[in-house]
Image: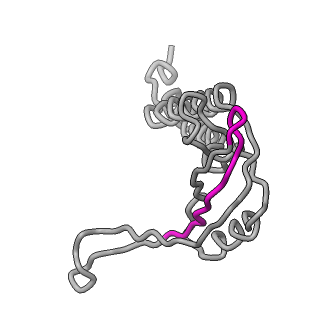
Amino acid sequence: MLFSMLLFLLSGYLAFAHYWIQTQWTKSEATALSGELRQLTSGSTGTLRSGGRFSKSYFYHCTVSYPVEGETRQSELDSPPSPYTMDAQVWAASWSRGQHIAIRYEDSNPSKIRLADNPADLTAMGSLRVAFCFFLPGLLLMLTSRSEWFDSR
């Protein structure tokens, strides 16, 4: 039950953050100028011989231009990271030079941009489903473990 409540609170936060960005940031259309596939390696500090583990993720790093109050601004945008090179290549194909990308920028800091419909931001419903999957069995276990249900009167 406690774990499901934590997941429920997390999903509430994610939903609020997504709502805030959708309503407070300005939507615009950016044009891809250039980009490159990049690799991010993360892992333990041990060496490979001593059992250190490393994981790689791939993403497409793109420079875009977009209009802000009559000016043309430039900023950088990254695709969501993936453990597969193919995913980054798909983003590269859709963000090739001259392609239009729907973005949102923060009014107080127009150089801070993000994808308008970032798949990484849309996790609130997924965590709500997981919270429900923990909540329902937890509730059933709590109800069946109550001693007054089994008292013979």
Closest to the observer: 6 or 106?
106
| Vertical placement of residue 96 versus 110, above or below | below
Classify residue 70 as left or right of residue 8: right
Q: Residue 62 at x, y = what percent? A: 61, 61
Colour mode of the rendering: one colour
Quarter location, residue 121: top right
Q: Residue at x 78, y 60 (%)?
A: 99
Location of residue 39 with respect to 70 vertically, above or below: below
Tell me which corner region of the image, top left, top right, bottom left or bottom right, holds residue 3: top left
Q: Is residue 71 above or below residue 152?
A: below
Q: Position of residue 145 (x, y in %)?
A: 46, 30
> Observer-nearest residue: 88 or 12?
88
The chief SS type of the magenta part is strand
Left or right, 119 with reference to 41: right
Residue 23 lies in the magenta-colored region: no
**Residue lying at the far front of the rendered structure:** 71
Instruction: Relative to 130, say whether 142 is above or below.
Output: above
Q: Residue furthest bottom?
A: 49
Bounds of the magenta segment:
57-71
77 lies left or right of 30: left
Residue at image x 60%, y 43%? 113
Residue drawn 21% across the image and 81% down it: 50
Q: Determine if the magenta segment contains residue 64.
A: yes
Give percent across and percent down for residue 142: 48, 29
The percent coordinates of residue 88 (x first, y second) are: 63, 70
